[in-house]
Amino acid sequence: MKASLKITKAGLLYTLLSIFIGIAAVNTGNNLLFIMISLLLSFMWLSGVFGRANLLGLESEVILPKEIYAKGKAFFFLRIRKKRSGLWRIKMPSFLLRLSINIRDSAGVERKIFSKIGLLEREREILIDAVFEKRGRYEVSTVEISSLFPIGFFIRSIKYEPKREFLVFPEPKKCQSLSEFERKVLKGENRGFQDLGTAQFEGLSDYTAGVPKKFIAWKSLAKWEELRRKIFAEELTSPKIFDVLKLPASSLEDKLSCAVYLILEVTKRGSPVGMRLGKESFPVGTGEAHKLKLLKALALYEEK
C-alpha cells in the first residue's frame, strides 16, 4: 500500500494566504494578525488530522466473475471495508471516497474505471461494469482510493496493488453457416435428453440448468452438498469433437467466437464436448471445469 498527498488550488491559495498573514504579523507586531494566523494554522492542522483518519484502516478487495466475454458487459465487485485499528478505534466513518481501478491488458495498455462512495461506515460492495473489446489476459494492476475530505485543501490517496489476473474469452457468435458439428449437436441429430437414459450408466458430471429431473443424481446432494447429473454411454460415443480452425468463418477471431458459441450451447444441454485447436487436442469432457479449460485455450490462442 502506498500513500500520497496532493495539494489542490484551494489548498495552495489558503497556504499562500496564511504565509502572507504570518509575514504581516511578524513585520507589524499586530496581535490580531497573530491570532488570525494561529486560527488559520490550527484549521489546516485539524483538516490534516481528519483527512488522514478518513483513509486510515481502509482495505480493498476485487471480486471477479468466473466468465467474462469480449464485447459483452462484465460485472465485478469492489469490496471496501473500514478496519478499526490503533488510535482510531473510535467508529469514525469515511466520507467522499473516489475509487479508481486500473486494468492492464497483455500488451500493456491501461484503462481506468471510476466510482464514488459518499459514506462508508464499515463495509460496502460496489458493482462495477466494464466492456472489454479484445480477448486475452488482463490484470487489475492497482486500486486507488482518494478523498478531498474534509475541506478540499488536499487530496489524500492510498494505492493498492492487488495484481489480480483474469481472462476475457472470445465473444460468443453464431457461425456464418451451419457446420456439420452444429447440425448434429444443435439441430436435431442429437436430440438433447429425449433419447438418453436407455444405455449403460457411465458416471456423473456437474449439474447444469435445464437438465430433466430423471437425469439428476439426487443422492449427490447429500454426499457432496451439490447437484450432479447422470452421464450415459450414448453421450460418450456420439461425435462431439470439432476442429476450431475448420469452422465456417472468414477470420480467426470469428472462428474462435463460433467455437465459444458451440461450447456454450452444448454444455448448456449438459452434453460432453471436445475440440481440436491447431496442434492441441482436447478430449471430450463435461462439467464446469472442462468448459473453462476449453474457453481458456480459445482466449489465449496465438497470444504472444
Image (spheres, helix red, strand yellow):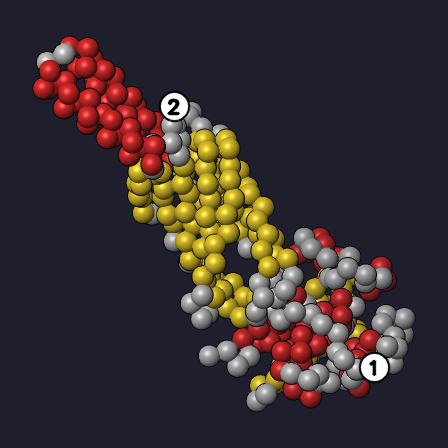
Q: Residues within 10 Å of mark 1 (few under 14, many from 20)?
A: few
Q: Nearer the viewer, residue 281 or 26?
A: 26
Residue 74, percent across and down?
A: 61, 57
Specify whether 22 is left or right of 228.
Answer: left
**Residue 40's spot in the image, x, y percent?**
26, 21
Residue sitting nearer the eye, 233 or 182 = 182
Query: Percent x, y for residue 170?
Result: 62, 71
Q: Which quadrant of the structure image shows residue 149? A: top left
The answer to which quarter of the image holds residue 109 is bottom left
Type of amino acid at the residue the image marks with label 2: Ile
Q: Which residue is mark 1?
A: 183
Residue 37 shows up from this direction: yes
| Comes first in the chain, label 1 or label 2 | 2
Q: Find residue 89 and report its horizontal and vertical position in percent.
A: 37, 26
Task: Point out which mark residue 90 bears.
Answer: 2
**Element type at mark 1:** helix
* Residue type at the position of mark 1: Arg
Q: Quadrant of residue 213?
A: bottom right
For residue 210, side relative to residue 246 (left or right): right
Q: Is residue 99 left or right of residue 23?
A: right
How many angstroms separate mark 1 from mark 2 (CA)? 66 Å
Query: Observer-nearest residue: 167 or 286?
Result: 167
Image height check: is 14 above or below 3? Answer: above
Kind of element beneath mark 2: loop
Q: Residue at x 51, y 37 (%)?
A: 117
- Residue drawn at x 51%, y 51% is 113
Q: Residue at x 19, y 10 (%)?
A: 32
